[in-house]
Amino acid sequence: TELQTAWNTFLAQQPSRDSAGDAIYSAIFDAAPELQYLFKTARSVMAMKFVNALNMLVADLPRPTVLKANTETLSFQHLDIDVTTPRAGVFRDAICELLQQELGANLTTLALSGLQALLNYTAGAMIYVRREYSDRINILRASWIAASHARLAEQEEQAANGQPLASMDRLPAAALEGEAEPASNSKRAKKIQA
């Protein structure tokens, strides 16, 4: 596609992927420095994440099912960030302006429209996933914390009473794998005995 050609030209014009990522990072945060607090990762790492994610999305364009799966994965990775339409617009516009500056006439109208559509699609997916799944994930997180605290309290009580601690590594393999029958009757035990 024209977008893939333009993207590959942009990458080829940069001295390295690091430079491409840094250019994207600078474009975004020069346009909106107030958004930097959303990203807690070091600049160099974040810059590489930007370029790698964009490269993946552009490369996936001819394969819609792969693009959808990778966009969903990216969206779940950004659940902790409050992606909003205005913030997504800042990212989209900064990236598009960077490619316009770097590529000039080599960035066709169709490639630019494709990039805008791709970034809008990705942002829309991030907003959707956060809206639809963040409550569920928070429930799972809270349940996990409650279960961990209950297990810790149980272990502390056992230790205080001088009882040996029950731990996962002391359970028979069949219990860990969810086998209902006793180990002596299991297929694995019969194979071992044979």
Image (cartoon, helix red, strand yellow):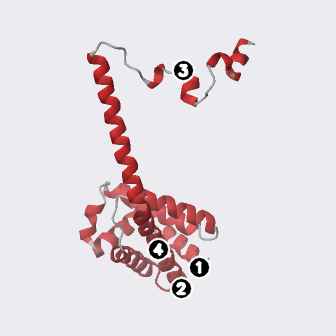
* Residue plotted at (53% across, 66% down): 57
Disc ID at residue 2: 1
The one of 130 and 14 positioned closer to us in this rendering: 130
Residue 170 x, y percent position in the rendering: 47, 19
Q: What element carries label 1?
A: helix
52 vs 33: above or below: above
Label 1 or label 2, whichever comes before in sequence order: 1
Disc ID at residue 108: 2
Q: Name the residue under label 3.
A: 172
Measure the C-alpha gap from mark 2 to mark 3. 64 Å
The one of 114 and 74 positioned closer to us in this rendering: 74
Q: What element carries label 4?
A: helix
Task: Tell me which amino acid carries mark 2.
Answer: Thr
* Residue plotted at (39% across, 59% down): 134
Q: Of tags 4 and 3, which is closer to the observer?
A: 3
Q: Is mark 3 on a helix, strand or loop?
A: loop
Q: Of tags 2 and 3, which is closer to the observer?
A: 3
Residue 4 x, y percent position in the rendering: 57, 73
Task: Tell me which amino acid carries mark 4.
Answer: Leu
User: How many neighbours does mark 4 have within 10 angstroms: few (below 14), some (14-19), or many (20 or more)?
Assistant: many
Residue contact between numbered discs 1 and 2, judged by CB atoms under 8 Å: yes
Label 4 or label 3, whichever comes before in sequence order: 4
Task: Tell me which amino acid carries mark 3.
Answer: Pro
* Number of disc labels: 4
Q: Mark 4 points at which residue?
A: 119
* Residue plotted at (37% across, 19% down): 165
Asked if residue 20 shows in the view, the reply is no
Label 1 or label 3, whichever comes before in sequence order: 1
